[in-house]
Image (tube, coloured by chain):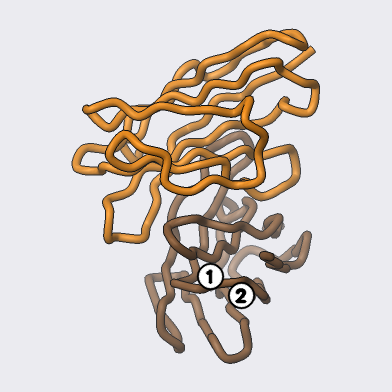
Amino acid sequence: GQNIDQPTEMTATEGAIVQINCTYQTSGFNGLFWYQQHAGEAPTFLSYNVLDGLEEKGRFSSFLSRSKGYSYLLLKELQMKDSASYLCAVINDYKLSFGAGTTVTVRA
Amino acid sequence: ETGVTQSPTHLIKTRGQQVTLRCSSQSGHNTVSWYQQALGQGPQFIFQYYREEENGRGNFPPRFSGLQFPNYSSELNVNALELDDSALYLCASSSRGRETQYFGPGTRLLVL
């Protein structure tokens, strides 16, 4: 079975940093994705981790520990446009299994 | 913009009816996956098509079926619609051997 957990909601102030955690227990693992989804829109690709460690891409960074079944997405210098749902997803045999998503609200 | 397109954008049906949703994959991609996303949930994998054949299926009944065409576009068909089928239906395209899937804008289906 697939079990992917992430917090339901987080709130942060513009300019701050927020870390969204994701833990997973899956029957197989080829990698972990983070997607951003604004309300009513399609998920958009943010990051992909295959090996342990930190991947940095501009204001967004993603970390993976395969031995712990753990990942986080770090959003720095938050902007109002970062208010969205952030989805953690594990890929196995070309199939994505998603968590329920974390809704991040950025306040002025 | 990912280059993945879906039609229609919105659809209203009644219980028992049938629906066909369409997806055109991004240029250079040969694999299409379909997902169902209920309100407040993450997307759930329905099935994937590669080289016009189903390549993996999630926990969905047989009334969910699909096709892939030689140009890699795809259709999702749902028969005998139920109220619980109301959701956002997403298709994602990818290139075999490359893991990243790129999503289309989705079709929002409402079953009354």
Residue that protrudes farthest toward the bottom in the picture: A67
Give the letter of the chain under mark 1.
A
Closer to the camera in the image, B104 or A60: B104
Above-or-below relation of B41 to B12: below
Rendered residue at 54%/45% (across/down): B57
Residue B77 falls left or right of residue A93 = right
Q: For the residue carrying disc 2, how many other residues have a C-alpha within 10 Å: few (<14), some (14-19), or many (20+)?
A: some
Q: Hey, what amino acid is under mark 1?
A: Glu
Q: Quadrant of residue A38?
A: top right
* Percent coordinates x, y for residue B47 in the rendering: 51, 41
* Percent coordinates x, y for residue A11 in the rendering: 75, 63
Q: Which residue is mark 2?
A: A17
> Which chain is in orange here?
B
Q: Are marks 1 and 2 in contact (CB under 8 Å)?
A: yes
Q: Quadrant of residue B31?
A: top left
Give the letter of the chain under mark 2.
A
Which part of the image, by quadrant, shows the N terminus of chain A?
A: bottom right
Total marks drawn?
2
Question: Do tags 1 and 2 sit on the same chain?
Answer: yes
Residue A63 falls left or right of residue B73 = right
> Which chain is in brown here?
A
Rendered residue at 36%/60% (across/down): B99
Rendered residue at 57%/91% (across/down): A67
* Percent coordinates x, y for residue B5 in the rendering: 38, 28
Q: Quadrant of residue A100?
A: bottom right
Q: Which residue is mark 1?
A: A77
